[in-house]
Image: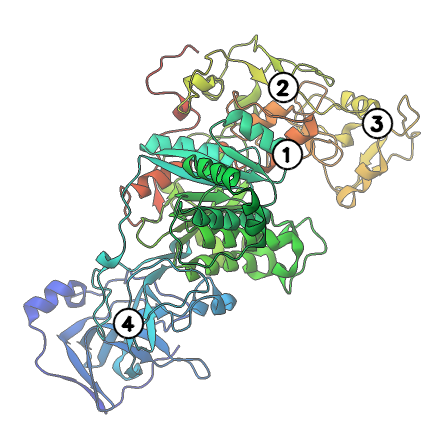
């Protein structure tokens, strides 16, 4: 944008700042040669017309613009393009350039609509703005008028709660940074407004650190994410315990109970769990276990009081054992609210109003639970379509809800293969932290990976480690062989869900993934050190599919196209060979089914695809049928077993699953890759102890799965 022409009705006033002070504060302005500015410039703000640092003749503390006196540190409106609201900025410099022109340097404030929140700005409190780290130089006559911006102390609030804000035009308590689209507490380090002095952060209640931190795992599945988080937290010196877990799948709940007997597992819908928590709190108040300023009005409670003594005993026991969490009990809530309505596989997605779709309602429920329990930390996981669907509406909604509650937030996209498994699997994560806590960073990758996800340009910066990958010393990407080559043979109709290995590990990954629970960093009291192989069973194929699989040759890239009677034209499209009769199976059905020929208009190589040892899986899914995906073992005539999929997801071998085989595949396919959870758990632990800086990323001091080994144990290979 072209700079406005300087006006004659403006000038600097008072004595210039001394040369010594000016050179000390702004040395780059007084260099003999021009230097490129290192300050980030937001595309939605005035770009200053140049990326070069202007040299200064002298600096000032005051300026007159249209008869109004402005001081360093004042907050002002700055001229915007015609038809747009004026920008908002803090004056951080007044200087006369070497060509004699007067300038000021602006540090910009963002309105909610200028941030990742965008069209959901109405979810955030009125008059609220966010201080940025974006600065640039502007002609002095761009200043329009003074604006009254108040800095207020951080405070967690309910989404519907009104804050006590002094009279002002705008207020702020957070900064907004483009790196990982981060909202963070505005520290008391010179960020305070010049119009009204800020209240001290010491007004915030400091909660004593507890030895144990309790975690609630919502939409827990079989517990992969919380297991990883607890392991990672342990590596940082924090004892994080999954105290409560909620999932609607009964088999997943059984698996979680089996592996985490310390956890209170609830097999119910999350919205029902929230209702339970609200009623539980009323009961605790009724029996004087917690203080209450509310009037108890619950028909259910009144009815239950008919058996008051028994009820009081039940509630008192539950209260003393933390059977159900009360507000303030939960340090950390994690979860991946299912949003099938945004999936790219859903052809009937509601682009106009995503949250009206019942398949996306769990995002609202998740945020309502956060609003009720007010944990210190929040971690939400979801598919990359969260950023793509309806211009990222659901991602923006999640951020807006947390920011409205005054949680700091940070977005990141992580690739499972970057943390030590042979799988790409891109997922989006959203950190939330109370304003008095350290906002956790994202962990740098430890391993190379082969691909990145296509995401909207606006969200490119949230790819963890993407811009720094050339600066990192990464381990070589793991392959399928690294993960599963040691596992004993299994048949299509394998009956044993528990067996001995009868083989030795061939790679470091296999050596450590075999550790027993007692040998790991999260042992159970009295846990056995014996190592057993669980769930090494494949989905049993019917006779027709088994016959087809047996005819898929054992070589890299083999699939249904290698079967007799199939040819590929010059457009890479399959068709039946007209020169031969179409082959049939023993059952009389065709060897090559019609669905394989028509899948993706005949251009797919996935149907009845055979994996190979040097490959990396794109994404472990919840189904094992080979009809439209590459899931056949490299050398055996079967699909990958539940355990092989679990290995690719980074599950320790001691993690045993419950339910029918199809349900086990679902549990593994829905899980957050365990090493991703470990990496995030470590980042949480470091931040929660105040040991991290304000950078959005952190380097991990370990690799997975070597980090699983208990510190005080010596184990054989």
Point out the frontmost of discs 2 and 4. Answer: 4
Dot placed on the residue nearer the N-terminal end, 4 or 3: 4
Name the residue tied to disc 1: 250
Q: How many marks?
A: 4
Q: Tell which circle, 2 or 3, labels the residue nearer the N-terminal end.
A: 2
Q: Is residue 192 above or below residue 550?
A: below
Query: Depth-wise, is mark 1 or mark 4 nearer the camera?
Result: 1
Q: Is residue 414 above or below residue 566?
A: below
Front residue (pair 491, 659):
659
Residue at (39, 34) in percent of width and height: 240
Is the residue under label 3 in contact with that under label 4 (CB below 8 Å)? Answer: no
Q: Is residue 353 visible?
A: yes
**Disc nearest the viewer among 4 and 3:** 4
Q: Kindly identify the residue that appears in the image at 29 percent across and 60 percent down.
A: 186
Tell me the number on the disc at residue 654: none
Give left or right: position of 162 versus 65. Answer: right
Q: Nearer the viewer, mark 1 or mark 3?
A: 1
Density class for disc 1 (Cα within 10 Å; few <14, some 14-19, many ≥20) is some
Residue 422: x and y in percent read 53, 30
Q: Which one is in front, 14 or 116?
A: 116
Mark pair 4, 3: CA separation: 76 Å
Q: Is residue 675 visible?
A: no
The residue carrying pointer 4 sits among few (fewer than 14), some (14 to 19) or many (20 or more) residues within 10 Å by Cα, namely many
Task: Quickly name the residue at label 4.
Answer: 150
């Amino acid at each position: 944008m072209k700079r406005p022409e300087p006006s004659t009705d403006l000038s600097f006033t008072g004595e210039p700042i001394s040369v010594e002070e000016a050179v000390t504060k702004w040395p780059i302005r007084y260099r003999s040669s021009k230097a490129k500015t290192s300050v980030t410039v937001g595309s939605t703000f005035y770009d200053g017309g140049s990326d070069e640092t202007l040299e200064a003749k002298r600096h000032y503390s005051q300026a007159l613009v249209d008869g109004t006196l402005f001081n360093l540190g004042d907050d002002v409106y700055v001229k915007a393009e015609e038809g747009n609201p004026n920008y908002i900025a803090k004056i951080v410099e007044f200087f006369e350039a070497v060509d004699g022109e007067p300038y000021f340097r602006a540090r910009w404030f963002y309105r909610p609509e200028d941030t990742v929140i965008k069209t959901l700005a109405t979810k955030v409190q009125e008059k609220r703005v966010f201080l940025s780290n974006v600065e640039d130089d502007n002609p002095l006559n761009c200043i329009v008028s003074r604006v009254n911006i108040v800095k207020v102390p951080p405070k967690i609030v309910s989404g519907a709660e009104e804050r006590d804000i002094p009279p002002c035009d705008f207020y702020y308590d957070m900064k907004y940074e483009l790196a990982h689209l981060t909202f963070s507490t505005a520290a008391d380090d010179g960020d305070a407004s010049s119009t009204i002095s800020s209240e001290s952060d010491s007004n915030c209640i400091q909660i004593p650190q507890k030895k144990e931190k309790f975690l609630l795992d919502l939409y827990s599945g079989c517990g992969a994410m919380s297991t990883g988080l607890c392991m990672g937290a342990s590596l940082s010196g924090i004892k994080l315990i999954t105290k409560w877990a909620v999932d609607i799948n009964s088999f997943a709940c059984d698996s979680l109970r089996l592996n985490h007997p310390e956890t209170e597992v609830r097999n119910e819908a999350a919205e029902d769990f929230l209702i339970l928590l609200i009623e539980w709190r009323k009961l605790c108040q009724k029996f004087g276990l917690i203080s209450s300023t509310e009037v108890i009005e619950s028909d259910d409670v009144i009815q239950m009081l008919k058996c008051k003594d028994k009820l009081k005993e039940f509630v008192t026991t539950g209260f003393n054992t933390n059977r159900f969490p009360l507000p303030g009990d939960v340090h950390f809530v994690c979860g991946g609210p299912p949003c099938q309505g945004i999936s790219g596989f859903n052809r009937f997605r509601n682009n106009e109003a995503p949250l009206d779709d019942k398949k996306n309602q769990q995002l609202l429920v998740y945020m309502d639970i956060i609003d009720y329990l007010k944990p210190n930390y929040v971690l939400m996981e979801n598919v990359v379509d969260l950023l793509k669907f309806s211009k990222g509406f659901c991602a923006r909604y999640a951020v807006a809800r947390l920011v409205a509650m005054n949680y700091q937030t940070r977005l990141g996209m992580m690739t499972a293969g970057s943390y030590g498994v042979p799988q790409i699997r891109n997922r989006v994560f959203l950190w939330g932290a109370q304003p008095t806590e350290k906002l956790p960073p994202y962990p740098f990758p430890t391993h190379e990976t082969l691909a990145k996800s296509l995401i909207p340009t606006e969200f490119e910066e949230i790819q963890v480690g993407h811009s720094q990958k050339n600066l990192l010393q990464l381990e070589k990407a793991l392959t399928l062989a690294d993960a599963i080559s040691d596992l004993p043979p299994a048949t299509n109709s394998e009956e044993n869900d528990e067996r001995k290995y009868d083989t030795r590990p061939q790679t470091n990954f296999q050596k450590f993934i075999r550790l027993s629970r007692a040998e790991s960093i999260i042992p159970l009291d009295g846990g056995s050190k014996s190592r057993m192989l669980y769930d090494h069973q494949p989905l049993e194929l019917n006779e027709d599919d088994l016959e087809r699989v047996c005819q898929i040759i054992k070589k890299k890239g083999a699939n249904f196209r290698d079967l007799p009677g199939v040819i590929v034209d010059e457009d890479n499209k399959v068709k039946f060979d007209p020169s031969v009769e179409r082959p049939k199976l023993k059952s009389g059905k065709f060897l090559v089914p019609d669905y394989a020929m028509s899948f993706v208009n005949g251009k797919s190589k996935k149907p009845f695809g055979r994996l190979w040892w040097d490959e990396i899986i794109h994404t472990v899914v919840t189904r094992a049928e080979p009809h439209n995906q590459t899931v056949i073992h490299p050398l055996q005539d079967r699909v990958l077993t539940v355990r092989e999929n679990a290995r690719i997801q980074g599950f320790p071998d001691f993690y045993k699953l419950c339910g029918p085989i199809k349900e086990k595949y679902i549990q593994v396919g829905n899980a957050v890759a365990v090493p991703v959870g470990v990496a995030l758990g470590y980042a949480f632990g470091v931040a929660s102890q105040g040991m991290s800086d304000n950078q959005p990323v952190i380097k991990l001091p370990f690799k997975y799965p070597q980090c699983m080994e208990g510190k005080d144990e010596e184990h054989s290979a």
